[in-house]
Amino acid sequence: MDSTSSRRVRHGRRLSVASLDRDRASISSGIALVARQQARRVVLVGLRGGERLLADAVAEGLAAGVLVRLDRRDGAAPAIVVSRPEL
């Protein structure tokens, strides 16, 4: 592999990590909004790494006292839904 293609691979990898970090921050922000009762529900759509981060998000949500789940509607992009537990 020449140095140009090697740089491309590493650069693409950094973008992927950056994308996951942005998605993780968005999920954490949604959890915080619901946990602080500033929102009843937050729906996050278009997260490229959403499914990959779901297990950690569920654990973070449980620790904050909120529910985090994946919503897959027919024909729609998967969404992460953060909500208050039903009483």
Image (spheres, rainbow, N blue to C red):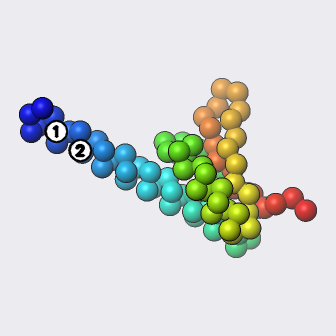
Q: Residue at x 87, y 58 (%)?
A: 86
What's the amino acid at mark 1? Ser
Residue 37: image tag: none
Q: Is residue 39 visible?
A: no
| Callouts 2 and 1 close, C-beta under 8 Å | yes
Q: Is residue 77 above or below residue 17?
A: above
Residue 10: image tag: 2
Mark 1 Cα-neighbour bin, 10 Å: few <14, some 14–19, many ≥20: few
Indicate the position of residue 68 as horizontal and vertical percent values. 69, 54
What's the amino acid at mark 2? Arg
Q: Is residue 65 above or below residue 20?
A: below
Q: Residue at x 57, y 63 (%)?
A: 28
**Location of mark 1 (residue):** 6
Mark 2 Cα-neighbour bin, 10 Å: few <14, some 14–19, many ≥20: few
Out of 48 and 55, give the one closest to the viewer. Answer: 55
Compared across the picture, whether 8 is left or right of 26 comes to: left
Quadrant the C terminus occupies = bottom right
